[in-house]
Amino acid sequence: MPHHEEATLTASDGHKLGAFVGRPDGKPKGGVVILQEIFGVNAHTQHDVDFFATNGYTAIAPAMFDRVERNAVLDYSEVERGLAIANAIGEAAVIADLQAAIDAVKSSGPVAVIGFCWGGALAYLAAAKCTGVDRAVAYYGTRIKMYCDTMQPKAPMMYHFGALDKSLPPDAIEKIRAADPAGVAHVYEGADHAFTNDDRPLYNATAAKLAHERTLAFRAKG
C-alpha cells in the first residue's frame, strides 16, 4: 500500500505551496506529477496520486490554486469559481510551481507530468517550458488549443480526448496534433470531458481503464 503525506514546496520566486504526496512500497520506478482539474487537490486528485503510487511511482499533486486561495477545494458545481482562480495565476507563476513539483520527485527517477482538464493543459505547458520532464500526458486538456499557438512540448507527449467533449471538438484536436506531430493522441468514442473522473457524471469506466493502461505503458518507456 502506498504511503501518503502532505508536503510544502518552495517555488523559485519564494512562493510556498502545498502538495499531496504518495510514495510506493519499495524502490520507486520514477516520479509523477499529478495536475488537478479546476477544483483543487480534491479527493479525486488524491485518488489519482494513489493510483500512480500503487503502480510504483512517487506521485505528487501540487496545490496549484495556492497562489490565489490556499487549500481551495471546490465543489464540481463551482466551475466559474475554478476558472476565475485559474485565470488569476500568471504563466510565470504557474511554471515556477510546476517546476517545484517536478524537482520534488526527480530524486525518484525520470519524471512524468500527468494532468486532467486544466491540469492537462498545464502538463503541456510543463513539457514546453519546464526542465526535467521526461514525458507528459494530457487528459482532455482544453486550454492546450491556446498554448499550442505559441509553444511546442520538448518532451514526448500522450493525449487523451473524449469524442463527445464539446470543449475539444475535432478541429481543436487536429490543431493540437499539428502542433505536436510526434505526440500520441487517442480519441475515445462515447466518452465526454472528464471521462476518467468517477466522482463526476461523465465518467466512462471502459474509456478510463484503457486510457490509464495506455498512460502506464507510455510512462514505463521513460
Image (spheres, grey):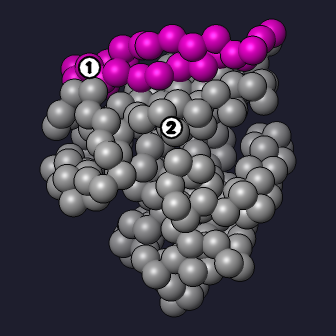
Mark 1: secondary structure: strand
Closer to us: 118 or 105: 118
Q: CA distance from mark 1 to mark 2?
A: 20 Å
* Position of 4 relative to 99 (above/below): above
The residue sitting at the bottom extreme is: 171
Whether 2 is drawn above or below 78: the answer is: above
Q: Amino acid at mark 2?
A: Thr
Q: Position of residue 86 (x, y in %)?
A: 25, 51
Q: Position of residue 133 (x, y in %)?
A: 58, 40
Q: Quadrant of residue 186?
A: bottom right
State the mark number for residue 29: none
Q: Of callouts 1 and 2, which one flags the residue occurring earlier in the amino acid sequence?
A: 1
Number of other residues with Cα within 10 Å of mark 2, as a class: few under 14, some 14 to 19, many 20 or more: many
- The region drawn magenta spans 1-26
Q: Which residue is mark 2?
A: 45
The x, y position of residue 55, in whole percent, is 78, 30
The quarter of the image holding the C terminus is top right
| Residue on which the image places disc 1 | 16
Q: Is residue 128 above or below residue 47?
A: below
Amino acid of disc 1: Lys
Q: For residue 73: magenta?
A: no
**Is 12 in the magenta?**
yes
The prevailing secondary structure element of the residues shown in magenta is: strand
The residue shown at (77%, 62%) is 206
Image quarter in which the N terminus is found: top right
Q: Position of residue 21 (x, y in %)?
A: 53, 20
Binning the other alpha carbons within 10 Å of mark 1 as few (below 14), some (14 to 19) or many (20 upward) gives some
